[in-house]
Image (spheres, coloured by chain):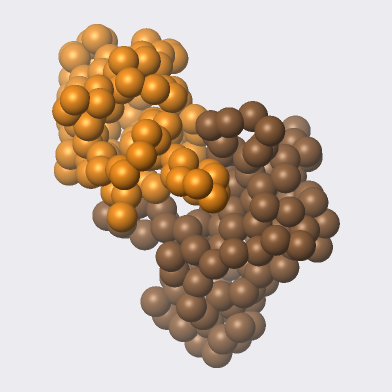
Amino acid sequence: DADVTQTPRNRITKTGKRIMLECSQTKGHDRMYWYRQDPGLGLRLIYYSFDVKDINKGEISDGYSVSRQAQAKFSLSLESAIPNQTALYFCATSDSSRPPDTQYFGPGTRLTVL
Amino acid sequence: GDSVTQMEGPVTLSEEACLTINCTYTATGYPSLFWYVQYPGEGLQLLLKATKADDKGSNKGFEATYRKETTSFHLEKGSVQVSDSAVYFCALSDRSSSNTGKLIFGQGTTLQVKP
């Protein structure tokens, strides 16, 4: 069984639509992260959360919002999708009690905005 | 700010060839260093890590040594296999006073191994 799951795995949507990407984990980790991957740019951090009540912006948070519904669930929303948000999105988790904060990644969601 | 620079790919090798993927970093403190691997269609998996200077991380025949004097963490393997074909990411962990644990990634290097 996968420890970090993401739904959906693939999504095609249109400009202006609201989209939610979901992430769930069974690792019991307190920290969760959302990244996007673009060719030639590596992974860039969108938002991260240390626990349910602690959410922080990453380097590219504009146009995105998140919700940490429970320790095990962290959702990413695009309020009004635009084509340059077409990318591969990854959720990750880590355990702050076990430095150096090795992160564990989900399988990714491929999002296409037309 | 902190940053990671990897050699540009793609890197194409024949099976059993030696591999080196260069990675250098810029950091204000003493970061932990990681190599992650992404196989086609999958998420990233931790390949190896090192937490302090002169530490050597190793896994699946891959090695990397944390070199503080040259701010490098080059990935090496003596004999690559077709199954090693993947994208490799070097990363460092932000260990500032806020202890965010954020990872800063290089741009990734694609390795293709031919039979």
**Residue at 19 percent of width and 25 percent of height:** B69
For chain B, the rendered hue is: orange
Question: In which quadrant of the rendered image does the N terminus of chain B lie?
Answer: bottom left
Q: What number of labels is visible?
A: 0
Residue farthest to the bottom, as pictured: A16
Question: Looking at the picture, does residue A70 appear above or below residue B102?
Answer: below
**Residue B108 visible:** no
In the picture, measured across the screen, residue B15 lies left or right of residue B41, that is left
**Residue at 59 percent of width and 64 percent of height:** A56
Across and down, in percent, residue B3 comes to 29, 48
Residue A73 found in image quarter: bottom right
Chain shown brown: that is A
Across and down, in percent, residue A64 comes to 56, 75
Across and down, in percent, residue B63 comes to 33, 15
In the picture, measured across the screen, residue B15 lies left or right of residue A9, that is left
Across and down, in percent, residue A24 comes to 74, 50
Question: In which quadrant of the rendered image does the C terminus of chain B lie?
Answer: top left
Residue A34 found in image quarter: bottom right
Question: Looking at the picture, does residue A33 appear above or below residue B18?
Answer: below
**Residue B28 visible:** yes
A71 and B28: which is toward the camera: B28
In the picture, measured across the screen, residue A14 lies left or right of residue A40, that is right
Residue B106 found in image quarter: top left
In the picture, measured across the screen, residue A66 lies left or right of residue B74, that is right
B67 and A66: which is toward the camera: B67
Residue farthest to the front, as pictured: B97
**Residue at 66 percent of width and 47 percent of height:** A31
Question: Looking at the picture, does residue B30 appear above or below residue B79?
Answer: below
Question: Looking at the picture, does residue A59 appear above or below residue B44?
Answer: below
